[in-house]
Image (cartoon, rainbow, N blue to C red):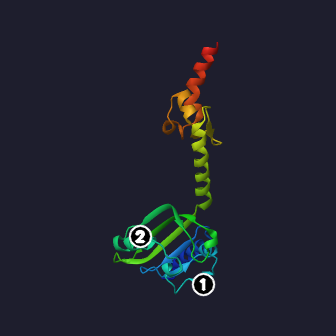
Amino acid sequence: KKKAQEILAEQSRLLEAFFKHSLTPIVFLDKSFNFIKVNDAYARVCQREASAFPGHNHFEFYPSDAQEIFRRVVETKKGYQTFAKPFTFPDHPEWGITYWDWTLGPILDDTGEIYFLVYSLNDVTVRKLAVEEVQKHAQLLDLANDTIMVCNLDGNIIYWNKGAENLYGWSKNEAIGQNIQDLLQPEFGKQLEDAK
């Protein structure tokens, strides 16, 4: 019995340490979406003290159309995940539209009923805005007659314009994600042979 208590205490300490020091914003909610507990990362994102959340409903602080999704998770007892979901903080409209990847997962008790919900979030606003900016520029680059390819540091193609499609015969969908050397090596070899 003593050993079981020690193991339980150790697991509790580990869980508390993870919850407190995780960089990912994490929230525990009851099945009515009332805050049970939030970690420090979530409190920082919301610019509130962690102690300000318990006793309040999530949608009291942050009303949104996600309430229907939360209800479905409770009804079906199946988790939900979304990517780059737009959200404007009602208490910080000056932040503008922010974008979040988030998951909501039900934790079930021994009888199969919802014990609590785990809500975790990741702020992807900077990434989302950067992608939109690249897409705007990509539309201009697609109009260029020049061949334009962009690769990441590993040599994987992340952009391939119409000029590249015309020159090499690979469509944008076929080229993006491929390694430039693997994709074009036969072409470079042919060009070298032709040059001889």
Q: CA distance from mark 2 to mark 1?
A: 26 Å
SS at circle 2: helix
SS at circle 1: helix
* Residue under the point 50% across and 71% down: 119
* Rendering coords of residue 182 (x, y %): 56, 31
* Residue 183 visible in the snapshot: yes
* Residue under the point 58% across and 53% down: 132
* Rendering coords of residue 61 (x, y %): 53, 80
In this rendering, position of residue 35 left or right of residue 110: right
Tell me the residue that label 1 is attached to. 51
Q: Is residue 26 above or below residue 128?
A: below
Which image quarter holds the C terminus?
top right
* Rendering coords of residue 65 (x, y %): 45, 71
Q: Is residue 152 above or below residue 103?
A: above
Q: Residues within 10 Å of mark 1 (few under 14, many from 20)?
A: few
* Residue under the point 59% across and 73% down: 42
* Residue 156 visible in the snapshot: no
Farthest-out residue, bottom: 55
Disc 2 marks a residue whose amino acid type is: Ile
Among the two numbered marks 2 and 1 on one chain, the one whose residue lies closer to the N terminus: 1
* Residue under the point 51% across and 31% down: 170
In this rendering, position of residue 31 left or right of residue 97: left
Q: Residue 129 falls in which quadrant of the image?
A: bottom right
Tag nearer the camera, 2 or 1: 2
Tell me the residue that label 2 is attached to. 69
Q: Residue 117 falls in which quadrant of the image?
A: bottom left
Q: Which mark is residue 59?
A: none
Observer-nearest residue: 101 or 7? 101
